[in-house]
Amino acid sequence: MNIYISNKVCNTEVFFVFNNDNILCKSVSNITNLNLQYLNKSGEFKKGLYSIAQITDYKNDKKMIFLRLGNETELNSEIIRRAAYHLIKYCESNTIRAISINLEDDNKKLGEYIKALSESAILSSYRYTEYLTNKEKNYLEEIIINTEQSDEIQNSLMEAINVANSVNICRDLVNEPSNIQTPVRLGDEVKSLSNIYGFDVNILDENDIKALNMQAFYEVAKGSINKPVLIVMKYFGDSNSDEIIGLIGKGVTYDSGGLNLKSGSRFITMKHDMAGSATVIGAMCAIAKQRLKANVVAVVAACENLISNTAYKPGDIIGSMAGKTILINSTDAEGRLTLIDAITYAIEKEKVTKIIDIATLTGASRRMFGDYLSSVMCNDDNFYSSFQEASIKTGELVCRVPEIEDAVSEIKGEISDYINTSASETCGMITASLFIREFVQNKPWIHIDGAGPCWLEKNKYYNTKGGSGWGTRLLYQTVKENCGK
Ligand code: BES
Ligand code: ZN
Ligand code: ZN
């Protein structure tokens, strides 16, 4: 899809209209106003959000599409993103190949709206066609944003295109099946992305992982014939700062549950248990391409959680890179074991000063929030407030859960330092988060449990079914909020 700014229009013009019939466009022709009045009178153009009406001038081969944005005072970026989604679907079902969208030149928020609009247009057009013999193409090919050119506007558009493409990279990685995308293949993929987007990558193999004493990670990995890798991505964009943000993504390329085997329908979607890592990889692409003024190191401990005669077992006591011992209560609580070693590596070897981890960690989070939002634990109010700001801007919503100090005792062991799950079947999302907190060495830390929104059973506006790409924009924006831009 080609999106660009121009003051030319094409045969199909789009106008955004508020409920009060004001148009988000400064000067409109008399014909436009007359058409709008006609559609209003005839009852074809309803009030409310996202209703669409079209009028065709057959003689001049021109179309006008009107789309409602609701109340003028309530407009925000998320409304624009959802409106863009409705517009794209409308164009697809009416086989419209090109549109020009008329936008007001002197609106204070024009840059923000152009960003939301173009981001959503790209996100809404995504399809996963890798394994289809007949790859149907999208019909809508061209979007002209009709407004005055300026550097600021052009930069907003370029940023939106970059970020949306990075979300689509994340989606592709999540949607790739685990028989193809083994941990080693995921590492290879990151290598090629690093060349395209301009960050460094270092892939550590099984021997390196053992030499580093990453025993918790290795125990999860050792039941599979497909070898684990530790993927380390680096982007240093601010030589004047000592701050290094660590992005840690859960990279379990398939989670069978291990000997605590999953059941029934729980298997089929478990290729997406590396969605956290895909989010981190997508965010690195966006951060590096955008040359953000920030230092970021991303770490992914990639492995499969399978069953074999070498698999770890419930009752085993294992070590960890941090030197603490852990009793395995459930082999299905594998994510936290891979994450704590990745976090220890990031702190000790890469000297990260702040940590964000993202993981499809608990069914409990999904049961609580569905695919509406992710649960977040954070040990630092300042860090959280910039993160929350980013979340509101991108529309990827989160709910902060309390650090219930009394619950820490549930993951403390009697014959080992820790147990990987609490013995009780309650409070699972909190105890999982607290388990990870034990390994962050008091660094400012945000933990995102995306088990709900990272994978969608059906399309939800511009978030597509399957790997949704949830969190990629949020990580990018959080890094942006925390740096000199
Ligand atoms: N990958 C799963 C969590 C998950 C479940 C993600 C459903 C997305 C959808 C994780 O490894 C897991 O199995 N967690 C267990 C933990 C339990 C054994 C304490 C869970 O949530 O059931
Ligand atoms: Zn599991
Ligand atoms: Zn898992």
Image (cartoon, grey):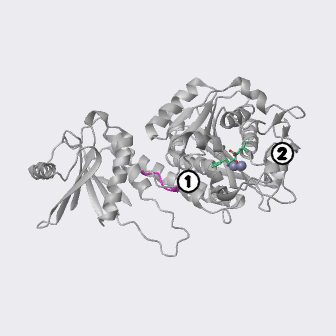
Helix, strand or loop: magenta stretch: loop
- Crowdedness near tag 2: few (<14), some (14–19) or many (≥20) residues, C-alpha within 10 Å: many
Q: Percent x, y for residue 453?
A: 54, 46
Does residue 8 appear in this view? no
Q: Is residue 382 above or below residue 417?
A: above
Query: What element does badge 1 sit on?
Result: helix
- Residue type at numbered disc 1: Cys
> Residue at the spot x=56%, y=48% of the render?
454
Q: Percent x, y for residue 379?
A: 64, 27
Where residue 196 sits, quadrant-wise, is bottom right
The segment highlighted magenta reads: 461-465
Position of 210 with respect to 198 (left or right) is right
Label disc, if present, on residue 170 of the rendered structure: 1
Q: Percent x, y for residue 350?
A: 71, 39
Residue underneath mark 2: 215
Q: Earlier in the sequence, mark 2 or mark 1?
A: 1
Assess whether residue 462 is covered by the magenta stretch.
yes
Q: Nearer the viewer, residue 378 or 346?
A: 378
Looking at the image, which residue sits at the far bottom? Answer: 133
Label disc, if present, on residue 278 of the rendered structure: none
Query: What element does badge 2 sit on?
Result: helix
Where residue 62 sits, quadrant-wise, is bottom left
Q: Is residue 205 above or below residue 212?
A: below
Report if the CB atoms under discs 2 and 1 are less than 8 Å apart.
no
- Residue type at numbered disc 2: Gln
> Residue at the spot x=15%, y=44% of the render?
27
Q: Nearer the viewer, residue 125 or 362?
A: 362
In the picture, the quarter occupied by the N terminus is bottom left
